[in-house]
Image (cartoon, rainbow, N blue to C red):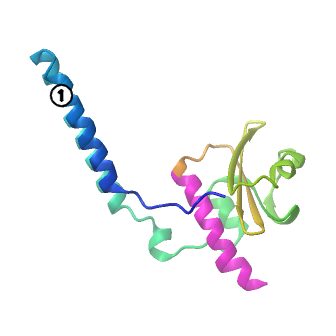
Amino acid sequence: MQSPERPIDIERIEKLIRGIENELVQVLKQTSADTMDVIISRINELKNYINQLERQCLMQNPPFTQMGYVPSSLSEFKELFRASFVGLMRGNDMVEYTGELNIDERLVRSVINYNMDFMVMYSNNKYIYLVKHDDYSLILLTDEYLDSVSSGLVRLLFRRFIDEVLKPQG
């Protein structure tokens, strides 16, 4: 199982950037003045872009983090991630699902017992996301690839769904 996600370590990123910048300045001192001006200009553009990304990361708080959003059903997962199928499994048994399972169910069952908490597969032009938490697994079938932030959101919301919606019910 993977360790819990850590917050972004801005200080570490800044130290890495300063270290790279210092190394580049040393290299640039050994090159022509024209080349050095171009490279320094590009470095400054990159620094500005990184600073802009940092500000966006710090300022952006999606509504689900502000409000403590937890999907109340598999239909909400389906809608939120534009999935064609969402299934909830407990062990090897499908407990509940919504949508049409357009993939080989044997494929899902063959990987359900792997020692992992998140897996992405590609089969028949579909992305299959498998998320585990405790005894439960979520199967999410989409046409689109989810980037790392969206994948992290699926994992976070599934854990919240299990802990705050499903477990209290029974």
For label 1, the residue is 26
Closer to us: 138 or 116: 116
Place residue 156 in its image quadrant: bottom right
Magenta segment: does it hold 3? no
Would you call the spot at circle 1 few (<14 residues within 10 Å), some (14-19), or many (20 or more)? few
Closer to us: 123 or 114: 114
Q: In this view, does 32 lie to the left or right of 9?
A: left
Q: Is residue 118 left or right of residue 22?
A: right
Q: Residue at horizontal 27%, vertical 48%?
A: 15
Percent from the top left, x then y, of residue 18?
23, 43
Closer to us: 125 or 58: 58
Q: Magenta region: which residues? A: 149-170
Q: Is residue 71 visible?
A: no
For badge 1, the amino acid type reads: Gln
Percent from the top left, x then y, of residue 127?
70, 44
Q: Residue at horizontal 23%, vertical 32%?
A: 23
